[in-house]
Image (spheres, rainbow, N blue to C red):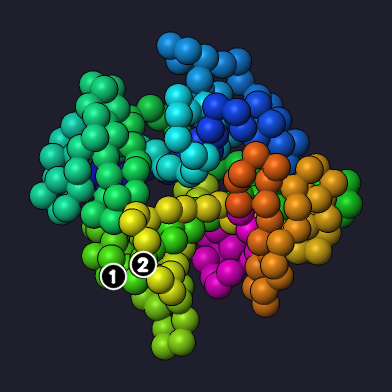
């Protein structure tokens, strides 16, 4: 199977949450918002300075706010054919990109547009740095093993299975990629796999305070992460992982 050369995360906002959600994530990342594009102006990019983008925003026609990912491959059509044999379902073939669902019904796209320059972590006036460097797939227990196998086959990334007593497995990409995949085994079954984004930071408390000042609400605090709730329905986490873990090719826990 053709291996991906990039992965982008899409923040898909419900129609009535889009404007507020896009404005929040523009503030949080410090990235420049692109002009709107698409047939209905539904797409925008959060563009880092001097690097390729990996965070994009979509205004949905309907449905709840969510996350999906774009997997960049040289031949989306051929890769889609291979993935259907591995349990994926093609939802829509747009010609230049293909929309699929994983075996656990997580929606993702195969695209071919080029990207290769990973942005560095962003340094903030408070004296710390941070970076959105992880997509966490939240997987129902009944589909966890099959979903993990599927994403491992699709990416070809280094696999770190769950240890005893842990709900987390991981797929570690080469350091040129902007995001890695964390695979969380949920406690209870749900109808489909969902996802959220994770921020790494050199100072979790300072980063959490920065997000609150930008408009998010602080949720429950765990040993390794703090749950955050955006005003537009987007839940995400600020973790205790150091952003250099992927940027310098040192992939570790977090």
Residue 239 visible from this viewpoint: yes
The magenta segment is 236-254
**Residue drawn at point x = 75 percent, y = 58 percent:** 218
x, y percentage for residue 193?
A: 37, 56
Q: Which residue is mark 1?
A: 142
Q: In which quarter of the view is residue 50 placed?
A: top right
**Residue drawn at point x = 59 percent, y = 63 percent:** 245
**Residue drawn at point x = 65 percent, y = 26 percent:** 19
Q: Nearer the viewer, residue 39 or 31?
A: 39
x, y percentage for residue 198?
A: 59, 56
Q: Which mark is residue 233?
A: none
Which tag is nearer the camera, tag 1 or tag 2?
Answer: 2
Q: Which mark is residue 189?
A: 2
Q: Nearer the viewer, residue 219 or 207?
A: 219
Q: In which quarter of the view is residue 7 placed?
A: top left
Contact between marks 1 and 2 (CB within 8 A): the answer is: yes
**Residue drawn at point x = 43 percent, y = 53 percent:** 194
């Amino acid at each position: 199977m053709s291996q991906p050369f990039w992965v982008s995360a899409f923040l898909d906002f419900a129609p009535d949450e889009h404007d507020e959600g896009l404005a929040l994530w523009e503030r949080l990342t410090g990235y420049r918002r692109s002009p709107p594009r698409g047939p209905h102006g539904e797409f925008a990019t959060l563009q880092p300075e001097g690097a390729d983008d990996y965070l994009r925003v979509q205004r949905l026609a309907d449905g709840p706010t969510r996350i999906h990912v774009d997997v960049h491959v040289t031949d989306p059509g051929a890769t889609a054919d291979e993935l259907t044999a591995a349990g994926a379902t093609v939802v829509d073939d747009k010609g230049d990109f293909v929309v699929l669902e994983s075996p656990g019904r997580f929606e993702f796209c195969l695209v071919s547009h080029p990207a290769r320059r990973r942005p560095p972590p962003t340094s903030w006036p408070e004296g710390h740095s941070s970076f959105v460097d992880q997509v966490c797939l939240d997987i129902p227990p009944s589909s966890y093993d099959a979903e993990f196998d599927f994403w491992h086959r699709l990416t070809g990334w280094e696999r770190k299975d769950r240890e005893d007593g842990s709900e987390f497995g991981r797929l570690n990409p080469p350091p040129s990629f902007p995001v890695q995949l964390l695979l969380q085994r949920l406690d209870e079954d749900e109808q489909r796999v969902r996802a959220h984004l994770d921020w790494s930071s050199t100072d979790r408390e300072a980063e959490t305070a920065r997000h609150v000042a930008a408009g998010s609400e602080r949720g429950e605090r765990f040993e390794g992460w703090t749950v955050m709730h955006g005003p537009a329905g987007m839940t995400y986490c600020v973790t205790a992982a150091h952003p250099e873990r992927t940027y310098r090719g040192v992939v570790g826990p977090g």
